[in-house]
Amino acid sequence: MTATEPVTLYDRVYAIEPGQRLVLSARDVPPAPGSSEGRDVFNSRAAGCQVCHSTRRGDDGVGPSLYGVASVAASRVPGLDAELYLRQSILLPDQYIVDGWPAGQMLPIYRERLDETQLEALILYLLTLTDEGES
C-alpha cells in the first residue's frame, strides 16, 4: 500500500448531522519484521549466525555456507516446507544434519536467545538466500 492509495476504514455510511462529530481512534501498529530486520538478527551478537555461517557461495566455515539455502530448504526433509525446515534447523539443529557436517556443531540455544519476532525475521531473511544470491 502506498500513501496515495485510499483505505476503507468502514464499509458503512454514517449520517452526521450539523453539530455532531464522528470520532475515530487509530493506532499505528508497526509492520511485521521483514528480511532486512532478519539480516540484522543474523549479524547480531544474540544470534551470531555469521560466526559459523557465510552467505557467500562455497564459503563454508564451522557450519555450511547458507548461500542458496532458500532454494533447497523445502526439499531437505520430507513433509517440511522451507520455512518449517529453517525453523527446525535453528531451534532443533540436530534433528536433520546436512551431509558432510557433524552433529552437535550448532547448539540448541536459540529458543532462549531469540524472541519470536527475531526468529520470524531471521527466517524471512534466510528465505531470501536463493541459489541466485540474496533476493
Image (cartoon, rainbow, N blue to C red):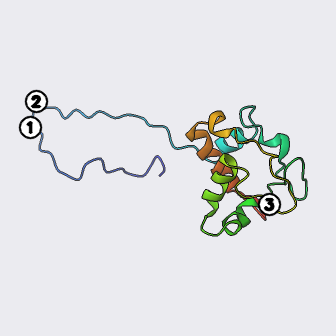
Residue 38: horizontal and vertical position, in percent?
66, 44
Residue at the image position 60 percent from the left and 57 percent from the top: 84
Amino acid type for the residue under numbered disc 1: Glu
Q: Tag 1: Cα neighbours inside 10 Å, few (<14), some, or many (≥20)?
A: few
> Is the C-beta separation of discs 1 and 2 under 8 Å?
yes
Where is mark 1, residue-wise?
17
Residue 62 picture location, percent across and down: 88, 47
Compare residues 71 and 4 and report the one nearer the observer: 71
Q: Amino acid at mark 2?
A: Gly
Drawn side of residue 54 relative to residue 87, left or right:
right
Between the residue at mark 1 and the residue at mark 2, the CA separation in whole angstroms equals 6 Å
Residue type indicated by callout 3:
Val
Query: Front-most of 49 and 9?
Result: 49
Q: Residues within 10 Å of mark 3 (few under 14, many from 20)?
A: few
When asked about the image quadrant of residue 114, the answer is: top right
Q: In the rendered image of this protein, does residue 2 appear above or below residue 131? A: above
Q: Position of residue 39 (x, y in %)?
A: 71, 43
Work out whether residue 12 or residue 96 is closer to the camera in this orientation and state it. Answer: 96
State yes or no: discs 3 and 2 in contact (Cβ < 8 Å): no
Q: Of the numbered discs in the image, which one, if any, rests on residue 38?
A: none
**Location of residue 69 in the rendering, given as x and y in whole percent from the top left corner:** 75, 60
Q: Which mark is residue 98?
A: 3
Q: Secondary structure at mark 1?
A: loop
Left or right, 92 with reference to 103? left
Secondary element at tag 3: loop
**Residue at (65, 53) in percent of width and height:** 88
